[in-house]
Image: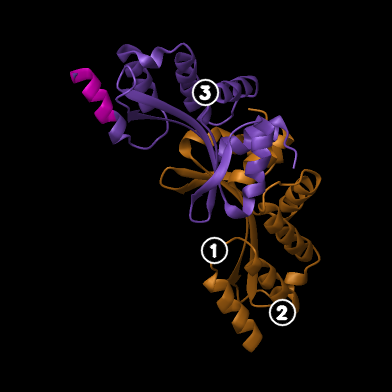
Chain colours: A orange, B purple
Amino acid sequence: MDLSPDWVVGFVDGEGCFHVSVQSHPEMTAGYQVLPEFVVVQHRRDIQVLYALKKFFQGGVVRVNHADRYSYRIRKLEQLERICEFFMNHPLKTKKNVDFRKFRKIILMMKEKKHLSQEGLKEIIDLALQMNTTERPALEKIKSALENG
Amino acid sequence: MDLSPDWVVGFVDGEGCFHVSVQSHPEMTAGYQVLPEFVVVQHRRDIQVLYALKKFFQGGVVRVNHADRYSYRIRKLEQLERICEFFMNHPLKTKKNVDFRKFRKIILMMKEKKHLSQEGLKEIIDLALQMNTTERPALEKIKSALENG
């Protein structure tokens, strides 16, 4: 299955997710690891679309998400940089584009190793907290730990 | 906001729904009314995308669905015929295309007034029962009423 850039933008406008989580990681300089990812989840019946996305973006991993659902995920920084380039050249049309812009800022900061400093990490967490619509209690907790530590 | 055909296909692959319901309607010859619709639902924040779809397809209605969600709906038969033409020329890539093909069969049958006969109505209900993934107890009930009546 071959995909066109416009189809990919439309499908990601509907089904894609740009997400950044932060996990405690004592070996990292700032004590935390930043984990950005681009994800598309589909029911098993549409797994071939996930493989078509993998082919289109020339990277990422398709695996079971939970139950009947499969995910296509990109987590490698250099592949995420390519994703960002693509969506700069082919802008999303929904408000997901607002999340994407913040996601891209985080990716660019990581490319410049800013996530390794306490200062940069705080900035990244603030950006991540503005993304997506769900509450992020874990991220809020890390934020206040950084502010009080 | 202007949409391209490929973007529309990608977005509908993710967010669109082809749905056929059947309601009791004593004034109709077969006693039931067939109600096909094409629907896209979005959070209020993306209402401009729904209006862009309305402009793209030159028909349909945008209105509140429930709570913060809005729907773009096409219910008029002649507009649905145009939708079917569009998705025949620009095929969906997900398994939603299987639903669409059944939907189109129903639209073509309605164009030929087959839904007005008991026989045609039964055939339409059988097609509708093969569409979408949710259970359709109301439709099953009408089906057995037709078979026993």
The mark closer to the camera, 2 or 1, is: 1
Instruction: Please indicate whether residue B106 sits to the left or right of residue A110 in the image.
Output: left
Identify residue type, mark 2.
Gln
Residue at numbered disc 2? A118
Q: CA distance from mark 2 to mark 3?
A: 60 Å
Identify residue type, mark 3.
Leu
Q: Secondary structure at mark 3?
A: helix
The label on residue B77 is: 3
Q: Nearer the viewer, residue B147 or A115?
A: B147
Q: CA distance from mark 2 to mark 1?
A: 25 Å
Q: Chain of mark 1?
A: A
Q: Nearer the viewer, residue A122 or A134?
A: A134
Instruction: Give coordinates of residue B32: x percent, y percent.
Output: 32, 24
Q: CA distance from mark 1 to mark 3?
A: 39 Å
> Does residue B100 appear anywhere in the picture?
yes
Residue at numbered disc 1? A134
Give yes or no for contact between labels 2 and 1 (Cβ–Cβ under 8 Å).
Answer: no
The label on residue B61 is: none
Q: Secondary structure at mark 1?
A: loop
Q: Residues within 10 Å of mark 2 (few under 14, many from 20)?
A: some
